Image (cartoon, rainbow, N blue to C red):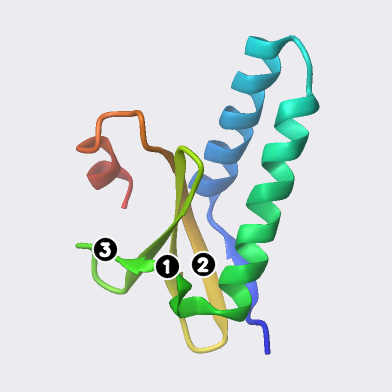
């Protein structure tokens, strides 16, 4: 049974920035729409199979890789908290400030 998904404020901001970046870069929302669907499907997978992501160095936090991005999340008793969507091309030390 799928767990309820809760998006953190940070994850909402990350998702919006990623999609806006691709809209501006490509002068079209076609790629952003496809990427948004991939994100939605990955979150559905996480909600059904919470152990699908790999454990991280952060306590109780897992991540699922999706193209050049990682979805960081935390499994709780009846919910999944999406903590952040991280662009893997960024400085990895920056994620420590977010999580």
From the top left corner, tell me how far across and down residue 54 is, in percent.
Answer: 35, 67
Residue 73 image label: none
Q: Is mark 3 on a helix, strand or loop?
A: loop
Nearer mark to the viewer, of 2 and 3: 3
What residue is shown at x 63% (from left), y 34% (from top)? 16
Q: Name the residue under label 1.
A: 53
**How far separated are the C-alphas under marks 1 and 3?**
9 Å
Give above or below for 30 relative to 6: above
Q: Where is residue 42 in the image (x, y as percent from the top left)?
A: 61, 59
Dot 2 corresponds to which residue? 81
The image shows residue 82, relative to residue 28, as above or below, that is: below
Q: How crowded is mark 2: few (under 14 residues within 10 Å), some or many (20 or more)?
A: some
User: Which quarter of the image is occupied by the N terminus?
Assistant: bottom right
Crowding at mark 3 (Cα within 10 Å: few <14, some 14-19, many 20+): few
**Quarter of the image holding residue 48?**
bottom right
In whole angstroms, how far apart are the C-alphas of marks 2 and 1?
A: 13 Å
């Amino acid at each position: 049974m799928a767990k309820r998904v809760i998006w953190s404020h940070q994850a909402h901001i990350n998702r919006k920035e990623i999609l806006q970046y691709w809209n501006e870069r490509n002068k079209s929302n076609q790629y952003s729409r496809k990427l948004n669907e991939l994100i939605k499907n990955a979150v559905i997978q996480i909600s059904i199979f919470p152990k699908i992501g790999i454990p991280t160095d952060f306590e109780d936090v897992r991540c699922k890789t999706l193209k050049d991005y990682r979805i960081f999340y935390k499994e709780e008793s009846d919910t999944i908290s999406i903590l952040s969507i991280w662009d893997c091309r960024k400085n990895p030390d920056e994620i420590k400030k977010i999580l």
